[in-house]
Image (tube, rainbow, N blue to C red):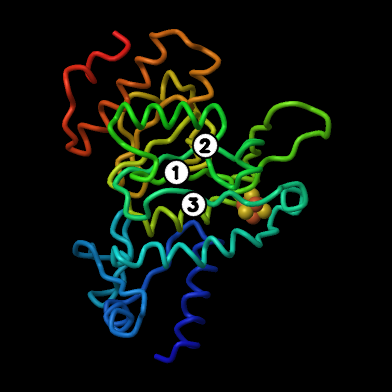
Amino acid sequence: MTQPALDFVIAALEKIRETNDHLPRASTTVLARLQCVSPLAVSLRGTPEPREGGPETSGFPKGRQLQPAAHGKAELLAPIRERVRTCTKCAHLACSRTQTVFGVGNPDADLMFIGEAPGVDEDKQGEPFVGRAGQLLTKILKAMNFAREDVYIANILKCRPDTVPGTFGNRVPTPKEMQTCRPYLVEQIEIIQPKVIVALGAVAVEGLLGMRGTMRELRGRWHAYNGIPLMITYHPAYLLRNQAPSEKRKVWEDMLQVLERLDQPISERQRNYFL
Ligand code: SF4
């Protein structure tokens, strides 16, 4: 397959993914050919589950999608970052933003954090979680023995939700805005393929899983996104508003579960934080 033809196929598949609830499917023969010709060096993880349509047909069941070779993840993210940078799907946000905020961290990370949207600081700096809530997230990471560079951090929305001029604070993204921007995050997750995802706050959960609920119901237990274990915990901004040690402990207990899931060693001191 020539490069222009390959580009055409990839563009068509991306279009299907952005506009359809179902992920694109391809036959095992096509996958084998793509493996031979694609510079993306894709490979399949696991054995495809049998699907309707005969033995030749291989769907991409959740959690078993095309896997990029680890060394190529940064390269695979680059064109998505570029599409985001020039995105105008939400015309009102494209006008009001200073810049888009794609994501930051290690493309090979085992752990990925997902928040809701850039705030004023993130919009200015072009990086997620750099304001006060972000600094608290960095502290939580440090307590987990991680640096920001060890994990990957992104938001559902890549543009700051606009606010009325002269008003203070950030606005919660609308369901429509999240639905419009979500395909970019889906692509990021598909490339990074973290072992664990942490969703920060109920808005991130709604944007990612389309599921509404109170944090009391959602947090502290395992969910899944496309077969990837997903922990839901409070957004750090909540901890800034509510500084009770009991709330900090709840978040920390969620992070202890994450560390256990990642087979990370946990010291006695770590276990006893905020007790
Ligand atoms: S929020 Fe997302 S979809 Fe909307 S304009 Fe920004 S990058 Fe594009």
Residue 191, image quadrant: bottom left
Tell me whether the residue at label 2 lies in contact with that at label 1, contact meaning CB atoms closer than 8 angstroms. yes
**Residue 202: x %, y % from top left:** 50, 29
Q: Nearer the viewer, mark 2 or mark 3?
A: 2
Q: Position of residue 84 (x, y in %)?
A: 59, 59
Where disc 1 sits, the SS reads strand
Nearer-N-terminus badge (2/3) = 2
Amino acid beneath label 3: Leu
Q: Which residue is mark 1?
A: 153
Quarter of the rendering occupied by the C terminus:
top left
Which secondary structure lies at badge 3?
A: helix
The circle on residue 129 is 2
Residue 185's tag is: 3
Q: Residue at x 47, y 80 (%)?
A: 9
For mark 2, does the 10 Å Cα neighbourhood hold few (<14), some (14 to 19), or many (20 or more) residues? many
Please report the residue visible at 22 percent of the width from the left and 36 percent of the height from the top: 261
- Badge 3 local density, few (<14 within 10 Å), some, or many (20+)? many
The mark nearer the N terminus, 1 or 3, is: 1
How many numbered circles does the render carry? 3
Amino acid at the residue labelled 2: Phe
What kind of residue is marked 1? Ile
Residue 85 point in image, percent of width and height: 62, 59
Q: Position of residue 100 (x, y in %)?
A: 62, 51
